[in-house]
Every structure is written in C-alpha cells, then in structure tokens.
Image: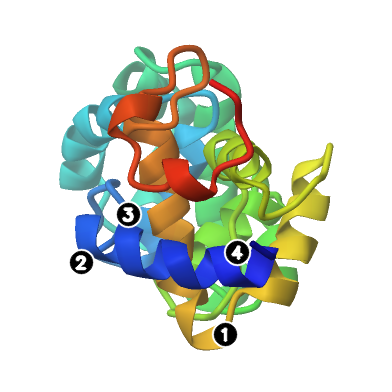
Amino acid sequence: MTPKEKIVFLEEVLGAKYPNPKSELVFASPFQLLIATVLAAQSTDKQVNIITRELFRVAPDAAAMSRMDIETITPLVRSINYFNNKAKNILALSRLLVDEHEGRVPDTREGLESLPGVGRKTANVVLSSAFRQPVMPVDTHVHRVSNRIGLVHTSKPEDTETELMKIIPEAWVIDFHHYILLHGRYTCKAKKPECAACPARSICDFGG
C-alpha cells in the first residue's frame, strides 16, 4: 500500500476513533493557546492545563500578562520543566505582542516565529488550532507514528512535516495532525506500543 493509500485508510479508521479531534490543551483565545504551547515543550498537556488554570485566571490576555513581572510569573509555572526560561519567554512575548501587535497574536508563521520562545512547531500549532490554517505541527508523536506506519521515511521532524504535506489532502491536514498525535499518545506509544489494539496494524510497517 502506498503512503497516499495509507492516508486514506487512516482517515477512515482514526477518524472513526477520534470523530472530533482537537488539541488537549485548554484555551479560550489564540493568546492562551500560544502561551500553553510554549509551556508544553518537554511537558505534558495535562501538566500545562493544571498550570494555566491559575495563570490565565490572573493574566488571561497579552495586556494582563505584560503588566506582570518575572517574580510573579515564575512561581505560577514552577512545577513545569524549564520553568525559568519559559517564564521569561511568556513575559517577553506578551510585552512584544502589546508593543508591536496591539496585543493580538500574529496569524502568520513569520510573525509567530519572531516572538521569544516560539519555533516552527509552536507556530504551526497556533496556526492550525487557533487560526484553522492547513499546516502540520510535528512533535515526537507525529514523527514517530508517521515513520512507524510508513507514511514517511525521515530522520528529522522538519522533513516529516514536508513529506506529510505532500501526501495529505489539504482539507484533511488539520484533523489528520490530531489523528496521528492522539494515536501516538494513546496507542502507538514510544516504549510500549499497543499493537494488538491498533486499528492501523494491517497497514503498519512497524514490527512491534
């Protein structure tokens, strides 16, 4: 089965398993998604949602966050990995949004990547989940699952993104990102993939 044929198969079986796919981060605006995604690097969505519940209560938007100081923000995010750098980044990007973007999150990759702490994957998450643009964020789950199944044969996440965008119909891209990510998070796990319960096992190249 070709990679494009596998895409069609996965659209059916993973679409049935995850009929309303969406980010598991809790957010009420593009700004909140941006902050949550910056915090989520090397951490779980569950950890981030616990932190942002209080963080967004005291600073729900860029204007409110920009008026805070680092001594106030740091304790709110201390329980997450790399909290010092993340605290500095979310404060700096909030101030930059206020100073240069009237408090609004840019809806372009270039604009997003100009913000402190925002790389290509984070920018793609915001473009996809906040602005509904057909881009493919590639994290460790998407990279691993795409290679195991045989959709791509790549060693770098950026190459996985490029190759996936060649074979996934544009109208499917947003949902397909969530299909692969959720499949990797709950079934095709890194250390102990649950192959026996996998709806994609009949087309998968992985010999688990």
Residue count near mark 1 (Cα–Cα under 10 Å), binned few <14, some 14–19, many ≥20: few
Rounded to the nearest angstrom, the CA distance separating label 1 from label 2 is 18 Å
Q: Which residue is depicted at the point 39% across and 61% down?
A: 31
Q: Amino acid at mark 3?
A: Ser
| Residue under label 3 | 23
Is 113 drawn above or below residue 155 in the view shown? below
Calculate the distance from the C-alpha at mark 2 to the C-alpha at mark 4. Answer: 17 Å
**At x 84% / y 37%, what residue is drawn?**
155
Quadrant location, the N terminus:
bottom right
Work out whether mark 4 precedes mark 3 in sequence or the reverse, and give the earlier one: 3
The disc, 2 or 4, on the residue closer to the chain's N-terminal end is 2
Q: Gap in Å between the C-alphas at discs 4 and 1?
A: 10 Å
Q: Residue at x 32, y 32 (%)?
A: 186
The answer to whether one can see residue 204 in this image is yes
Residue in the foreground of this view, choosing between 64 and 146: 146
Q: Quadrant of residue 156?
A: top right
Q: Along the polypeptide, which appears first: circle 1 or circle 2?
A: 2
* Label disc, if present, on residue 20 of the rendered structure: 2
Residue 170, label in figure: 1
Q: Residues within 10 Å of mark 2 (few under 14, many from 20)?
A: few
Looking at the rendered structure, the secondary structure element under dot 1 is helix
Q: Position of residue 182 (x, y in %)?
A: 36, 44
Q: Which residue is mark 4?
A: 136
Does the rendering let one see residue 18?
A: no
Circle number at residue 52: none
126 left or right, relative to 56: right
Residue 14 lies, in percent from the top left, at: 33, 58
